[in-house]
Amino acid sequence: NAMLSWQRTAFHFQPERNWMNDPNGPLFHKGWYHLFYQYNPFSAVWGNITWGHAVSRDLIHWLYLPEAIVRDMWFDINGAWSGSATLLPGGEIVMLYTGYTHQQVQVQNLAYPADASDPLLLNWVKYAKNPVMVPPPGIGPNDFRDPTTAWFGPDNKWTLTLGSMLNDSGLSLVYKTTDFINYELNDHFLHIVPGTGMWECVDFYPVSINGSVGLDTSANGPGVKHVLKASLDDTKLDYYAIGTYFIENDTWIPDDPDLDVGIGLRLDYGKYYASKSFYDQNKQRRVLWGWINESDSEVADITKGWASLQTIPRTVLYDKKTGTNLLQWPVEEIESLRLSSHEFKELLVKPGTVVPLHIGPATQLDIIAEFEIELLGSEGIVNNVEGCGVGAVERSAFGPFGILAIANDQLSELTPIYFRLSNHGNGTSTITTSTSFCVDETRSSKAPDVSKQVFGSKVPVLNDEKLSLRVLVDHSIIESFAQGGRTVISSRVYPTEAIYGAARLFLFNNATDINIKASLKIWQLNSAFIRPFPFHDTQ
Ligand code: DQQ
């Protein structure tokens, strides 16, 4: 439908048509990155789930391939659900995925490439004696899904984990195997958190505490911590925690019990779910994918003929400066899309003002911004608004201020991306106590059927740091990274007027007691021209 075609993005991965959800089985093989994804071949709403498949040389320019795993056996006839790849030392690839059986039971199935020497991994074979794991006694038939990548341990076994639930406690079961056919269930859970409900799409991986490179999923030892992530079915939010993996009994505990999985940190405070990472042996980094669902209506999705996107893949590192959080950052390959740029140095933005940034079209952008704060008036100002407030219209002493993206000239359609500082009312002249990072979607669209939220969270800012921001704008999606990726917010927006050449970018300062000096570098980004694989071209 041409009427809604401006909502299609230019450099985010999205299906050519129909519905997509979770990223599945990401891997790098013979020069190609592979992304599989939950896909409905027949409609723009969830159902009939199979595995879509696409490849890329650089994680940015994708080519669609035929579906990889379809629903054709009793053990997956009601859905080929989420799963993960494990690369074996000999170059073999094993894929474990959840099948929803003819009797509506969740089971784990094994598949492998028909020809591992095929760089495109076009054909997949299902193990004839699937399933390889069935719900163990005490676990519900619908609480058993989404196996992780397996890691190899000192016991010479492959270990993997998958999400489940007991009563209302979310948990992760641990299985061991030597051949990917026969599995033993551990008697300990990897972890369990009361009150968090069913855990979907568990991700479990090591991070290096020196924070410089990504680690293979099997890496362990001194200088390594482990990240546990669960996607909470009850709230559709992705929570993670950093902690210690005890290899002797395959259990994990969080560094800070107050920041446990499901109650502490989120990977992304916007529209984001069912994420999955993989170790990219090509560039020694851990790369994270996440599903960005729509926030318009199903009717609108059916009208436009497609639904959902994946985030720009992000590198994930441990933040050695804070020691409390991960850092997520768009993979460096996104920079290959950069075209012309504009630079602005120390632009003054006074309280209650908006400053236009004359950059030409503002629908495909990579924005890097830094903000300095100048305190006005006397000492002893108390900030009265905590966190994001009701949105960017709510003024307080030290915020909000930031960027207005995908805005029209009249400023009647816009999405503010902002900081708000708080001094907790202790009345000192320094304003360092806590900083929130937020996106306000409430005025992002004049369309009637869109759910619009104010998203945000606190972001750690160290004493010697300026406030900094990276924002990727792509027609109907805004991915925002604060302080080098400590806090991340993905937003789905549906402009009706701020489209194509009518979209603008502004700075704003809605604080009452500070001046802002903003320095920015802004690039126009090229499209990634995501399209079907050109099988018929001469190679
Ligand atoms: N999506 C899949 C499940 C998973 C859920 C089904 C998470 O395997 O638990 O499409 O979005």
Image: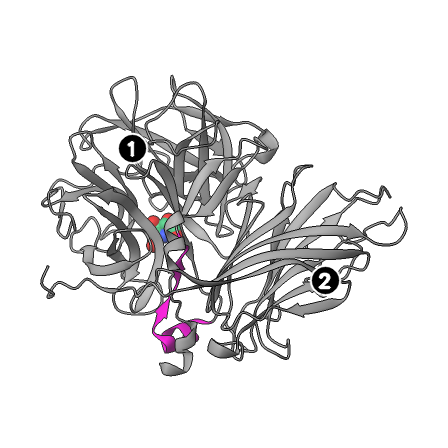
Residue 538: give x, y in percent of width and height.
9, 63
Label 1 near ligand 1 (CB < 8 Å): no
Residue 70 seen from this side: no
Q: Which residues are magenta?
A: 297-312
Is the residue marked by circle 2 packed among few (<14), some (14-19), or many (20+) residues within 10 Å? many
Is residue 310 rendered magenta in the image? yes
Q: Residue at x 31, y 49 (%)?
A: 24
Q: For the C terminus, give its image quadrant.
A: bottom left
Q: Amino acid at mark 1?
A: Ala
In the rendered structure, does residue 485 fall within the stretch colored magenta? no
Quarter of the image for residue 460 reads top right
Q: Position of residue 448 (x, y in %)?
A: 55, 78
- Closest to the observer: 42 or 360? 360
Type of amino acid under label 2: Val
Can you tell which mark lies on residue 349?
2
Along the horizontal axis of the image, is 120 left or right of 464? Answer: left
For the residues carrying marks 1 and 2, which lies nearer the camera in this image? 2
For residue 150, which numbered disc appears in the image?
A: 1
Image quadrant assignment for residue 90: top left
Whether residue 505 can be seen here: yes
> Looking at the picture, how far across and down is residue 291, in whole percent?
41, 55
Residue 123 left/right relative to 320: left
